[in-house]
Image (tube, rainbow, N blue to C red):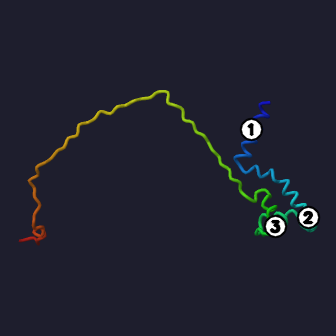
Amino acid sequence: MRRRTAILLLLIYTMGATELDQLLRVPLLVKHFVIHKSENPGITVAMFIKMHYIDRQLFDGDYLEDMQLPFKQADDHCLILATVVPEPLVTVYHETPLLPYEYNLFNNPYKPLLNGGNIFKPPRV
């Protein structure tokens, strides 16, 4: 019983979260092939697949039926994963001591040369 329930839940999940639900449309593919086969007895399965999946899609009388075939349109699937972060077992509080700020203001007697061109003189003998 548990195995059947697990398989059922897995199937429900994969059908809802992936494109595997497109496989449920395979009977529509067979039915559509039978319709094409009755209209053109010389059509093969490969020609049918090429006509509907590889060649450019024509806007003909059965366009809406063509769009119902499996893997013709992408379904909007949203995979939502809930992540639960457990509360920590131990909370550690680490207080950093406040260090006093020291402001060193220097009374610098150095004053730059007002005439900066004096340092670029050629050497004297």
Q: Residues within 10 Å of mark 1 (few under 14, many from 20)?
A: few
| Lower position in the chain sequence, tag 3 or tag 2 | 2
At horizontal 23% and vertical 37% (from top left) the residue drawn is: 100
Residue 90, image x and y in percent? 46, 27
Total numbered labels placed on residues in the image: 3
At horizontal 90% and vertical 60% (from top left) the residue drawn is: 34
Residue 79, image x and y in percent? 65, 46
Residue 24, image x and y in percent? 81, 50
Q: CA distance from mark 1 to mark 3?
A: 37 Å
Residue 43 marker: none
Q: Amino acid at mark 3?
A: Met
In the picture shown, does residue 101 fall above or below 95? below
23 sits left or right of 93 in the view: right
Quarter occupied by residue 85: top right
Location of mark 3 (residue): 51
| Lower position in the chain sequence, tag 1 or tag 2 | 1
Quarter occupied by residue 6: top right
In the picture shown, does residue 38 fall above or below 92? below
Residue 43, image x and y in percent? 89, 67
Quarter occupied by residue 84: top right
Location of mark 1 (residue): 9
Q: CA distance from mark 1 to mark 2?
A: 38 Å
- Quarter holding the C terminus? bottom left
Q: Residues within 10 Å of mark 3 (few under 14, many from 20)?
A: few
In the picture shown, does residue 73 fall above or below 6? below
| Lower position in the chain sequence, tag 1 or tag 3 | 1
80 sits left or right of 55 in the view: left
Location of mark 2 (residue): 37
Q: Amino acid at mark 1?
A: Leu
33 sits left or right of 8 in the view: right
Q: Amino acid at mark 2?
A: Lys
